[in-house]
Image: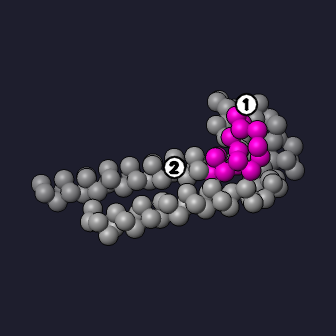
Amino acid sequence: MDSTVRRFVWGGFLVAIGVALLLSPFASKSPDGLDRVAEDKGFLKKGAADAVCPAPAPGYEAPWIATDWLSTSVAGVAGTCLTFGLAYSLALLIARRGNRSINS
């Protein structure tokens, strides 16, 4: 990967972290579309009871942090890092496989 692309990717990552850190506390506390439908149809609690494993950040908050805005910011940064890490790893894997087929 050339240095311009690398700087662009990491710059985008830093912007995403900044957005998650600074703007996530201002997100709406209202339920999203799927939660709203589940609430309206009466099966929201049933889905939580049948969960195979508990959500790592229920309600988009870090449950071990007492301060609401900080809890939401930490959950946003963690989600951003996890998503970036998975996408970056997948991109590297695809690039390596592409290079292998070109060189073969």
98 lies above or below 54? below
**SS for dot 2:** helix
- Tell me if I can see residue 79 in this picture: yes
Counting residues from the start of the chain, the first of labels 2 and 1 encountered is 1
Question: Residue 93, image x and y in percent?
Answer: 32, 50
- The residue under label 2 is 81
User: What type is the residue that disc 2 sits on?
Assistant: Cys
Residue 65 is covered by the magenta coloring: yes
| Res 50 label | 1
Stretch in magenta: 62-76
Q: Nearer the viewer, residue 24 or 83?
A: 24
Q: Nearer the viewer, residue 61 or 30?
A: 61
Q: Residue at x 48, y 53 (%)?
A: 84
Mark 2 is surrounded, within 10 Å at the Cα level, by few (under 14), some (14 to 19) or many (20 or more) other residues, namely some
Residue at the left extreme, as displayed: 104
| Res 74 label | none
**SS for dot 1:** loop
- Tell me if I can see residue 47 in this picture: no
Residue 24 is covered by the magenta coloring: no
Q: Nearer the viewer, mark 2 or mark 1?
A: 2
61 lies above or below 31? above
- Position of the N terminus by quadrant: bottom left
77 lies above or below 66? below
User: What type is the residue that disc 1 sits on?
Assistant: Asp
Q: CA distance from mark 2 to mark 1?
A: 28 Å
Quarter of the image holding residue 59? Answer: top right
Q: Residue at x 44, y 65 (%)?
A: 11
Mark 1 is surrounded, within 10 Å at the Cα level, by few (under 14), some (14 to 19) or many (20 or more) other residues, namely few
